[in-house]
Amino acid sequence: MPTPTPTPTSLPVSAPVRFTVVGNPENRRTALFTTAVTSAGHPAPRVLAWQEVLRGRYAFTRGEFVRVDSPGENAEVDRLLRGTDDPTRVEGTAVWHRRFTTVLTEVTDAARRAGATASVDAGEVAVMFDKRRCHARLTAAGVPVPPALTGPVDGWDGLRRQLEEARLTRVFVKPAHGSSASGIVALSLAGPGRVRATTSVESSPDGRLYNSLRVRHCTTEAEVAALIDALAPDGLHVERWLPKASQGGRAADLRVVVIAGRATHAVVRTSRHPMTNLHLGGTRGDLDAVRAAIRAAGGDFTDVLETAERAAACFPGTLCVGVDILPATGWRRFTVAEVNAFGDLLPRLTGLPGSGAEGLDTYAAQVAAAPAAPRPAHHEEHRHDTHPATGTSAGDPTRHPRGYGVRPGHRTRA
């Protein structure tokens, strides 16, 4: 059963907001958002199942707020989007991206025509689900990202050649449209014929690729070449493998959730492997210890939050994004690895101090930030706090083109 959403007594309930969710009804994402909506005093949201939406069976009404949620974790939806009957298959992400972004454009256009407000911008989601385009957009905005190859990668021979020309020996090879570490390969080159690849991908005797919960190592060039050649047709994004800071002897990074332009939630992820995803053996780390490590290095945790907000500002039409932050060894510099359109699934995590989402999980904070929804109490002495990414008032809904806006308090330097 989903954990109930905290409901602070400071959150007043005024006119109810009509919410609609485009999602998978059986999924915990939908359940957690429904709990957040009803806990805030609104009627339970209307749920439009992705299976029906993909078949064109949906409609919206004027004034409702439409939350578009992840289509993942449903085998039938995956089959409709990727054309495969096995959700553990790695291949098919290019087809998935084309079909998903097409239907998402239709859904958000229909919502706009009906006078409803959607939680996402379809064009922005299309960019976030293309790691090459997302990296280029962040780079153009001056957001720190790992150096990456810019040309297409057609297979192992081409990848080796490009890496030699760029003088890169340690890289992450990522399916351009993948998510949840699907198909990712952490690759090290140490001279002719000396390679090591760390991945959760397994191949069958017929060459098909499958996701596994077991991280494994490939140490022969023939095996690595076969893996890269099989991944390449869907498109690859290749970026430098930056040395990450550690916590307790484990590699560490951070997921920062940004809602209406403000970093509201953060979690540390640690792992013995290059991939820190929880389903691959990663665990939540100690955020207070991260704050202390950053202070000891002469920095401030707000540097992390402001980096995440700069990345989120590249996608102003989307209410909520999850930004993956890579802390460099020594905890002094921070780089954006990815921006996730559906990066808010962090159960039981409540808002950061000074974020305006204290006591709220990621779903409750989005309910509070939705247009026409009641806002958390806002203290007089915080009214003139300026938003670090835009320079506008932190509580000013005009800082977001759709009027999204939690009312954050003053962010104290940690």
Image (cartoon, rainbow, N blue to C red):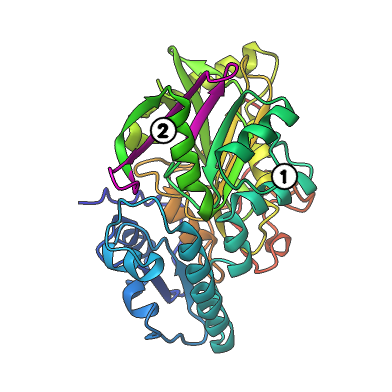
Q: Residues within 10 Å of mark 2 (few under 14, many from 20)?
A: many
Residue 112: image x %, image y %? Answer: 58, 82
Residue 214: image x %, image y %? Answer: 30, 32
Residue 414 shown left or right of residue 92 in the figure: right
Instruction: Please give the name of the residue rendered at 72% of the width and 36% of the height, measured from the top-left corner.
Output: 144
> Is residue 164 found inside the magenta-colored segment of the image?
no
User: Is residue 45 in sight in this rendering?
Assistant: no
Q: Is residue 392 shown above or below 381?
A: below
Q: Secondary structure at mark 2?
A: strand
Residue 39 shown left or right of residue 110 in the figure: left
User: Is residue 140 in sight in this rendering?
Assistant: yes
Per the model, the C-alpha gap separating discs 1 and 2 is: 23 Å
Question: Which kind of residue does numbered mark 2 sit on?
Answer: Thr
Image label count: 2
Q: Which mark is residue 199?
A: 2
> Is residue 197 found inside the magenta-colored segment of the image?
yes
Q: Quadrant of residue 32?
A: bottom left
Circles 1 and 2 in contact, beta carbons < 8 Å: no
Q: Which mark is residue 260?
A: none
Residue sitting nearer the eye, 393 or 231: 231
Residue 253: image x %, image y %? Answer: 52, 29
- Image: magenta residue range: 184-210
Q: Is residue 251 shown above or below 320?
A: above
Q: Which residue is mark 1?
A: 150
Which quadrant of the figure contains the C terminus? top right
Instruction: Please give the name of the residue rendered at 58% of the width and 34% of the height, measured from the top-left corner.
Output: 325
Question: Which kind of residue does numbered mark 1 sit on?
Answer: Thr
Residue 120: image x %, image y %? Answer: 56, 66
Q: Quadrant of residue 283?
A: top left
